[in-house]
Image (cartoon, helix red, strand yellow):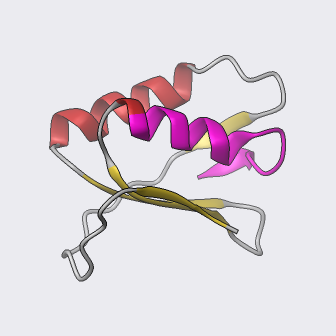
């Protein structure tokens, strides 16, 4: 995810949306200024997550681009966590 997405509570917003949709995974800031999110859940839940994240009114964040990629589950997440 690119844009103005680090700072301003963006990871917390991501956490709240994921929790509300019962999604598991992680969100973390990367060194290149992007945010990386791993999600596990039903396709419907993940689609709704992306929609809500794009439409969430956060004056401190601006999403320019969301790249999605399906990867093989190598790890089972039991909850959604913010990684520092």
Up the image or down, 21 lies above or below 77; here it is above
Residue at the (21%, 49%) spot, across then down: 41
Q: Which residue is most to the front? A: 78
Coordinates of residue 83 in the picture (x, y in percent): 61, 67
| Residue 75 part of the magenta-drawn span | no
Q: Which residue is most to the bottom? A: 74
* Displayed quadrant of residue 60: top right
Residue at the (83%, 47%) spot, across then down: 7
Residue at the (69%, 60%) spot, across then down: 34
Residue 74 or residue 64, whichever sits in front: 74
Coordinates of residue 20 in the picture (x, y in percent): 39, 30
- For the record, the magenta segment spans 1-19
Residue at the (55%, 19%) spot, across then down: 55
Q: Is residue 59 left or right of residue 28?
A: right
Coordinates of residue 48 in the picture (x, y in percent): 32, 28
Q: Is residue 51 left or right of residue 46?
A: right
Up the image or down, 53 lies above or below 15; here it is above
Which image quarter holds the C terminus? bottom right
Count of marks overlaid on the render: 0
Coordinates of residue 27 in the picture (x, y in percent): 55, 59
Q: Is residue 69 left or right of residue 74?
A: right
* Displayed quadrant of residue 79: bottom left
Up the image or down, 30 lies above or below 60; here it is below
| Residue 17 part of the magenta-drawn span | yes
């Amino acid at each position: 995810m690119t844009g103005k997405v680090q700072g301003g509570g963006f990871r917390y917003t991501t956490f709240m949306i994921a929790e509300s949709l019962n999604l598991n995974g992680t969100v973390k800031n990367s060194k290149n200024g992007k945010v990386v999110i791993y999600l596990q859940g039903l396709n419907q839940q993940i689609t709704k997550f992306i929609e809500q994240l794009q439409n969430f009114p956060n004056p401190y964040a601006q999403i320019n681009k969301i790249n999605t990629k399906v990867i093989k589950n190598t790890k089972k997440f039991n909850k959604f966590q913010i990684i520092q």
